[in-house]
Amino acid sequence: MPPVNQIPVTLLVRPNTLTTRAPHAGLAPRFVPRCSTKKILHEPMTSEPQLNLALRYHSFGNPRDVLKLESSQLVQRSADALRVRMTCAPINPSDIIPVTGAYRHLTTPPKTAGYEGFGRVVEASPQFAHLLGQRVLPLRGDGTWQRYVDCDPEIAVPVPDSISDSLAARGYINPLSAQFLLQKWPVANKRVIITGAGSNIAALLIQWAQADGAAQITGIYRSPERRDRLETLGVLPVAERDIYSVDAEAREADITFDAVGGPVGSRILNRMRLGTECVGYGLLSGQPVLPDSQNTAAHRRFHLRDELSKLDPEAWQNCFLSIWPRLAAAKLQEIQRIPFEDWQKALDLFEMPGRAHKPMLQF
């Protein structure tokens, strides 16, 4: 696994173009009481299966070609690590892109795929026995698309009882990115454009920007199936292909959160006014944003890994204290659970334009 500040988490291409240390004193009491534990503390570890099942790639390429489901003997965990039995994990663009080789300067095969999900702690050192049976997000360690994940107990994020399994599984990349974006570029009383408006992260940006007092939000969408959903969220929907409306909204916008890049992102940036900002946080088109000679708006870039590199473990945990209640109140896409062994069916759903459900691998 690359260092935390090299974890590739930015969206890059559209879904249908697949080409431990002891925690700081005082941390545990802040989180553990919020979460229940199943009473497996004295269950013999021999009752757990001793084989791991992982979705791995040994070379870059089309995920359908290079991802392989591999079975292997569980190795003894490090004495200071937690062992987590995964429950489910979503499929995000940021899970797929490293497999294609787009992050080859940061990622070197062989690797286990997947960057988020949740499970229950099944093994821990005596110091962390209070975590046994607890739901956690085993993040920033080995890939999550496997039956067992070993992780740093200081980084594992306890999941409160009030959070459903479906929310817990997707409580990291999109929520944390949306939260940082709105903290770095406040939207109160501003006219906001959000491209790639049909995505799951866009849904969070829309709802949280509304809560933060945005004056108006315009959602630029590609699939016609997204329009009704955007209207339901109180967004002005504009189709990518409607370039005249895109131009008009760009000229009036104060800030754009762009996940698409390419012709769409470039067009919006080049029509925004002096003193406004276009923040790029993904390249769903697979193409860069190109400012023209008349461009006057500021073009910013956002990478979640840059923000993570600034966080000590306590600040990291505190991020989730603010995310959980906002995530619980958000209106998100329904999920469809698919058995881990049927991962190719999950990719089929992931690639489907305008899909109504988010694919979730069930372990």
Image: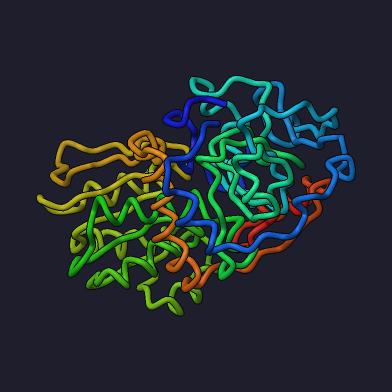
Query: Residue 285: horizontal and vertical position, in percent?
Result: 47, 43
Side of 79 relative to 178 (left or right) = right
Which sits in the foreground, 259 or 112? 112
Can residue 357 be seen here? The reply is no
Marks counted in the figure total 0
Q: Residue at x 39, y 45 (%)?
A: 314
Side of 252 relative to 103 (left or right) = left
Q: Residue at x 75, y 51 (%)?
A: 41
Query: Residue 205: horizontal and vertical position, in percent?
Result: 38, 61
Q: Is residue 310 above or below residue 353?
A: above
Q: Residue at the left extreme?
A: 274
Q: Residue at x 16, y 46 (%)?
A: 297
Query: Residue 28: horizontal and vertical position, in percent?
Result: 49, 50
Which sits in the foreground, 280 or 28? 28
Q: How is the image coloured?
A: rainbow
Which sits in the foreground, 3 or 96? 3
Side of 35 relative to 256 (left or right) = right
Query: Residue 20: horizontal and vertical position, in percent?
Result: 55, 31
Q: Residue at x 78, y 45 (%)?
A: 344
Q: Quadrant of the N terminus?
A: top right
